[in-house]
Every structure is written in structure tokens, then in C-alpha cells.
Image (cartoon, rainbow, N blue to C red):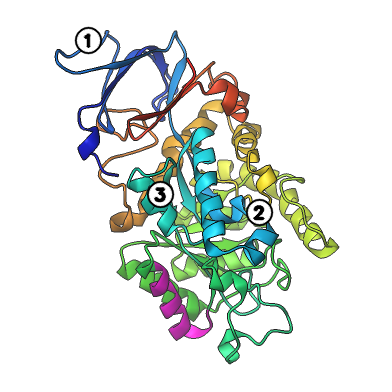
Amino acid sequence: MSTSSKAKRRVVFRDVRVFDGVSEKLVTGDVLIEGDRVAAVSESPIGDEPGRETHEIVGGGRVLMPGMSDAHVHLVGNANSYVDMVLGSESHIALNGLAEARNMLLRGFTAVRDMAGDTGSIKSAIDRGQFQGPRIYPSQAAVSQTSGHGDFGFVYDTPTALAGTESRAEQIGFMRVANGEAQVLAAVREQLKKGATQIKVMVGGGAASMYDPLYTVQFTATELRAAVDAATDYGTYVASHVYNVVGIHRAVEAGVKSIEHGHLADEATIAMLAEREVWLSMQPFALGDHHYPDPDRADKDRQICTGTDQVYEWAKKHGVRVAWGTDLLLEPQLAARQSEMAARLGDHYSNFEALRMLTSGNAELFRLAGERDPYRQARFGVIAEDAWADVLLVDGNPLEDLNLLADPGKNLPVIVMNGEIVKNAL
């Protein structure tokens, strides 16, 4: 994000209790923001600087915390209904996504990892300062095999691999269907060309798709290694959608660095993720987070939700690197559930553990993008000197009551993103 026009901006939070994203101990004092960075965290009062205007925000003992991040969003998928995606123009779909990006920011999410969707232009508009929104780590189109989780062609359509036409999901850049090593290489390189910071591949069945049961394993080991090789050559990594045990093992053996979901894993598989230092990007799914019109997909959703509690327990037991995300999709009227799901993380972790995951923890996963990380010049998810100035003032103490995050309109009176005051209700 450009800093040239922001170099002289100076913001001071006074009398705040600082949760820095790392330590459970709150530090009471002042926080100075200069430009787009945190300049100081001080237990002593920070004075004004002669000749420079200072915007002062008196916290009154409220908690100041880093902006939160969501490790598994679909900006355009979350902002548009199924009808929008099928019948809407690409500009209609993108504009809805841009509006939802601002909504996410107003919920306190200052960074998101987009795991399928053409979000490159949305990201560019936000980074240029033309619109408000979080830092976006785009995957661009998720890569699927024919009949895989990302194949949304109808059963009577001829697959593209057999000279058929692209499905609507491919036409709008939401998915890319590829078969065989050569096509997988091309599909991954296509997303990197479009600005992907990491690559998403489908390695097993899912609830949203119509043709693939949850037990299916998708892409051969050779195809997956091709995807990993192409991403590695660009200095980044592959994340894989997969719920089942066999698919998780195949993905890890191929070099995938992040398992997205994993709700149907067994304990030995979760322990293996810890041993191999592979991330588990989980979502605290519960019945009602998604709605499906047919009994087959509704049953798949039920099976997935049933595994949530147990997998979290095993992940804690074995010390797995766990990230938090939401994966809300095609029901824009439920988009605000993102905040409820953040608070729901407290059902599985202590409030401190949950807050650390929502801030500095998720940020560690995002940084796997390496040289592809567009925001690598500074850290986020922490309040520390020279970190990005993405902070939230909470009306209360989330270390004592995580449910404060479920109602951001009421409980987040001040939101600062990249040093800019996005909201100030004080």
C-alpha cells in the first residue's frame, strides 16, 4: 500500500490496555502510529510533536488489539448468491466482492486469505487506497480435476479435457479444471501470472459440489507434486481442500503446506501434521453455517460439522499449527456470521489462545507466501514497533469475554487500517 501521501499522519491512542497479539499480559499506556506503521508502544505518555498535527484517541482503559485475519474466505463467493454467480456480469460479481471487503474490514478483519475467486482487481483497488478493505492474499482460481470439488460443469456437459466448453465457475475465474501433469502445471502458473500469493488445489470431496463424495481422493500424486513444484519455483506454497485421511496424507507427501478443513481426519493423521510441520487451516463449522437444497449435500455438511470438536481436540493434544477461517459461501445474507465464528473459536481454545490465533497466529501462515507476500515489508497481527498499523479498539476486554467480537458494530468503536482511521465512534 502506498505511503507517500500518508507519511505525515500521526495518531496517538492514549490510556489503552494493549494486547499485542503475542503475550497474554496487557500493557497499559499509549500507542503511537506514524504513517502506516506503529511507531511506539509506551507505558509513559507520548507527547505531541511540534509542527505536526496529531489525531488523539482517548481509550479510557479499553483494550487495543491487532486487526484480525481470516485464513479462508471467498470474497466474491461470500458476497454473491448462486444466482449472482451464474447470471451476474463479472463486474456485478466483483463490485459485490468489493463491498464485502469493506464489510469485513468493519468487522475488524484487516487481512484475509482468499481461497478461490478472481480477487486480484479488488486487491489492487484497495492497495491503491481507492477503496477500503483488508489486506488480501489471493489464490485466484482454485484448481480441480474433472469431477472434483471445483468442477461445477453440469453432468451432461462435455469436460474441457474432452474438448468441451468451460463451466461458468471457470469463466468467472472462480475455478480452473485441469487433468494430468501438464494441465496442472499450466493451471498453477496461470494463477501465479494473475497474482496469486499461494495456490489452492482440491484433493478431496466437499459439501458444496454435486458429484464428489467426501471419501474421494482427487489428483494423483504426480499431479499434486507438479502443482507443488510450480508454486515452489515461484517461492510460495500449495494449500489443499481436503477432509479425508487418504487425501490429507497424499497432499502432505506431495509437499502441500496447508490442509484446508481436515474435519474427517483421525488422530494419527492429525499427529502426522504436527510431525511434518504442516498447517491445519480449520473452521469451527456447526450445522446452520451453510444450507444446501438437496439431501446429499446436506448430509455431507452434517458429516463435516460432526468432526469439528474432535479434530480441534487432537490438534491441541499434538501441537499442530492451527489457523482459523470461515469458508462462508454463496449466502451473502449470512456474511456477518464471520464475527460469530470468530467468537466460536472460544469453544475450543482459551480466550488468549483464540485471540492469538486470530491475530499473530494466522499471520504466520500468511507469511508462507515468501517473496509472493505483497505486505512483507512489515508484520501484521501484532502491535509492535514498525508493524503495520492495523489495530482495533475494543469496548471491553476480549481476553475475558471473546463474545465481544461477535458484535463488532457495538464493540469495536475504533478501527484503524494501514494507519488510516476507518471508524471512530468515540
Residue 184 counted in the magenta span:
yes
Q: Earlier in the sequence, mark 3 or mark 1?
A: 1
Residue 271 counted in the magenta span:
no
Q: In the displayed structure, would residue 214 be above or below residue 310?
A: below
Residue 13, x across and y down, in percent: 35, 16
Foreground pick, 98 / 184: 98
The kind of secondary structure element at disc 3 is helix
Residue at 60%, 74% (x, y): give it.
218
Quarter residue 220 falls in: bottom right
Residue 2, x across and y down, in percent: 26, 43
Query: Which dot, 2 or 1, sits closer to the camera?
Result: 1
Query: Which dot, 2 or 3, sits closer to the camera?
Result: 3
**What residue would you read off at disc 2?**
263
- Identity of the amino acid at label 2? His
Magenta region:
178-191
- Identity of the amino acid at label 3? Phe
Q: Earlier in the sequence, mark 2 or mark 3?
A: 2
Residue 413, x across and y down, in percent: 50, 21
Packing grade of label 3 (10 A; few <14, some 14-19, many >=20) is many
**What residue would you read off at disc 3?**
366
**What residue would you read off at disc 1?**
47
- Identity of the amino acid at label 1? Gly
Residue 189 visible here = yes
